[in-house]
Image (cartoon, rainbow, N blue to C red):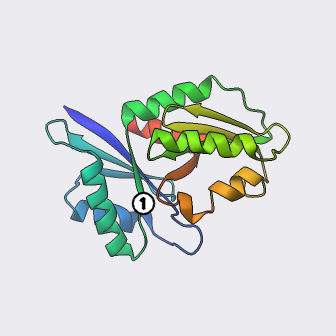
Amino acid sequence: MASKYVLLMRGINVNGVSMKMKDLKDALIGLGYPDVQTILATGNIILTQDASQAFGELETAEIARALGKEFQYDCHLFLRTRDEIGDIVAAASAVEVPDEFHHYCLFCDHKEVVSELSGLFASAPKAPGERFIPVGREAFWMVPKGSTLGTDFGSKVLGKKAYKSRLTSRNINTVNKIYAACSK
């Protein structure tokens, strides 16, 4: 039986880091992962592995090193299983978000990061209606469209080097697309 894993890359096709998804897919195939799918152009990778093959943080770190070398960039990957992505999709569907807001999922390397982010959010001035909801080792962040990096929280978290290796963000629409592709 095959298992699906999602690797989320941080900082792809933004801030001068340009990468074609075909090249990324070819690099992963070259690393010995024959069943690779990319979703959108933001570094969302689905790997299908035989269930008898172990896949975890060690393999993720090895892939990050290899991709960093291949593409000459400081590669940070966040590993989730298909079921974990499904849990995020289910939790997100229970949250009402106005149309004029972005709904982000912040994928963190450890649950402690979510606690740290909760503290930052609680102490920061907020845009009207801006919300932060911890969900296990992830968090949802709802922010008015057009003000993602303009909010105090967004400017302290998304663009800062201190969080570069600790989290990545995806719009919930992207997370839904990743889950749909995992479910095929």
> Which residue lies at the image location 22% right of the left edge and 43% below the top edge?
49
Give whichever of 150, 93 is nearer the camera.
150
On the image, the x and y values in percent for residue 95 come to 66, 26
Local crowd at mark 1 within 10 Å, few (<14), some, or many (≥20)? many
Most extreme residue toward the right, as rendered? Answer: 128
On the image, the x and y values in percent for residue 176 come to 53, 37
136 lies left or right of 172:
left
15 lies left or right of 143:
left
On the image, the x and y values in percent for residue 80 come to 39, 41
On the image, the x and y values in percent for residue 107 come to 51, 45
> Which residue lies at the image location 29% right of the left edge and 67% below the top edge?
66
Vertically, is 12 above or below 176?
below
48 lies left or right of 42:
left
Quarter of the N terminus within the rendering: top left
Most extreme residue toward the top, as rendered? Answer: 94
Q: Give the tally of numbered discs.
A: 1
Give whichever of 43, 151 is nearer the camera.
151
Secondary structure beneath label 1? loop
Q: Amino acid at mark 1?
A: His
Q: Quadrant of residue 56?
A: top left
Which residue matches tag 1?
76
Vertically, is 66 above or below 173?
below
Residue 123, visible in the rendered structure: yes
Most extreme residue toward the left, as rendered? Answer: 52
Quarter of the C terminus within the rendering: top left
